[in-house]
Image: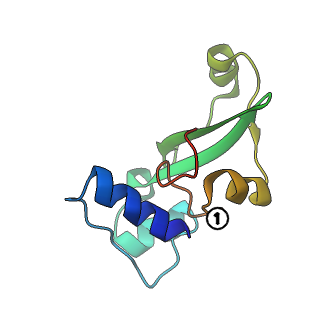
Amino acid sequence: MSLESVRAFLSAHAPDIEIIETAESSSTVALAAEAHGVEPAQIAKTICLRVGEQMMLVVAGGTARLDNRKFKDTFGAKGRMLDAEEVVAVTSHPVGGVCPFGLPSPL
């Protein structure tokens, strides 16, 4: 379901973007960088968080870390990582393959 929802989204919103599928796993930043022949800092990772009852996605550079103080100052509370089952339920994408589009509902 995940890849098909991304294909549908890109077809409707950015038909000129080519989806590149690799035989290698891209479930971690290191593996994605290796599969695409780039440095880990060139990979974008999507992090799924909960702040109170609100779910959100944060897209960051592959080597970036969340600054908890800045996050709390910006969003008013500490972000909690979703577990693998929650990630799939909210995004339709498995952990290691989450992207910020092709979602069942906006985040």
| Amino acid identity at mark 1 | Pro
Nearest to the observer: residue 95 or residue 67: 95
Q: Quadrant of the C terminus?
A: top right
Please name the residue shown 57% across and 68% down the image.
27
Nearest to the observer: residue 4 or residue 72: 4
- 10 in relation to 70, above or below: below
Q: Is 11 positioned to the left or the right of 43 in the image?
A: left
- 6 in relation to 37, above or below: above
Identify the coloring. rainbow
Please name the residue shown 58% across and 52% down the image.
104
| Residue 17 percent location from the top left of the image | 24, 60
Where residue 78 sits, quadrant-wise, is top right
| Residue 88 percent location from the top left of the image | 69, 59
- 29 in relation to 51, above or below: below
| Residue 28 percent location from the top left of the image | 57, 64
- Residue under numbered circle 1: 94
Q: Is 79 positioned to the left or the right of 10 in the image?
A: right
Give the total number of marks visible in the rendering: 1
Q: Is 80 positioned to the left or the right of 56 in the image?
A: right
Q: Quadrant of the N terminus?
A: bottom right
Nearest to the observer: residue 87 or residue 68: 87
Q: Is 56 positioned to the left or the right of 78 in the image?
A: left
Q: Residue furthest left?
A: 16
Residue density around tag 1, few if under 14, some if 14–19, many if 20 or more, within 10 Å:
some
| Residue 90 percent location from the top left of the image | 68, 50
Q: Tag 1's secondary structure?
A: loop
Please name the residue shown 76% across and 21% down the image.
77
Please name the residue shown 76% across and 59% down the image.
84
Q: Residue furthest bottom?
A: 23
